[in-house]
Image (spheres, grey):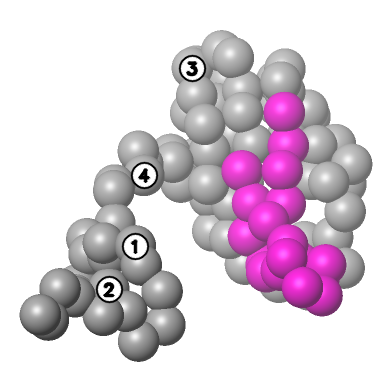
Amino acid sequence: MNIFVAGLSYNVKEEELREQFEKIGSVATVKIITDKFTGRSKGFGFVDMPDDEQAQRAIDQLNGVEMQGRALVVNKSEERKPREDNNRGGGGGGYKRRENRY
């Protein structure tokens, strides 16, 4: 089960988060999301636990637990929904792209 973890201190390392979840069960992967420009943590991440029972126990036991002075928010990760276009140019092209005007 993929687990969403928010409320992380910007100083928490992936290994520390792994240790917290391994107290409850087996952990396959841990990924703290970082800003692509600064490399700084965004304060959330994902933990994948192969055993669904252990994963649910981790959610129940760790949600609200304080880690480095911040309360964790721990939930089952929802499937990422595709983004809507919202008229943001979504057809490709470039800056000041010209259509066939002639």
Q: Residues within 10 Å of mark 3 (few under 14, many from 20)?
A: few
Magenta region: which residues? 29-46
Whole-Å distance between the Cαs marked 2 and 4?
22 Å
Sequence-wise, the earlier of marks 1 and 4 is: 4
The quadrant in which residue 61 appears is top right
Describe the element under mark 4 as helix, strand or loop: loop
Question: Which residue appears at 55% of the width and 26% of the height?
Answer: 55
Magenta part, dominant SS: strand
Which is in the foreground here, disc 1 or disc 3?
Answer: 1
Sequence-wise, the earlier of marks 2 and 3 is: 3
Whole-Å distance between the Cαs marked 2 and 3?
41 Å
Which is in the foreground here, disc 1 or disc 4?
Answer: 1
For label 2, the residue is 89
Q: Which mark is residue 92?
A: 1
For label 3, the residue is 52
Q: Does the magenta stretch include residue 45?
A: yes
Which is in the foreground here, disc 4 or disc 3?
Answer: 4
Describe the element under mark 2 as helix, strand or loop: loop
Mark 1 touching mark 4, by CB under 8 A? no
Sequence-wise, the earlier of marks 2 and 4 is: 4
Kind of residue sitting beneath label 1: Gly
Describe the element under mark 1 as helix, strand or loop: loop
Whole-Å distance between the Cαs marked 4 and 3?
19 Å
Which is in the foreground here, disc 2 or disc 4?
Answer: 2
Kind of residue sitting beneath label 2: Gly
Kind of residue sitting beneath label 3: Asp
Mark 2 touching mark 1, by CB under 8 A? yes
Along the line of sight, which residue is nearer the eye, 2 or 97?
97
Question: Which residue appears at 68% of the width and 56% of the height?
Answer: 33
Whole-Å distance between the Cαs marked 1 and 3?
41 Å
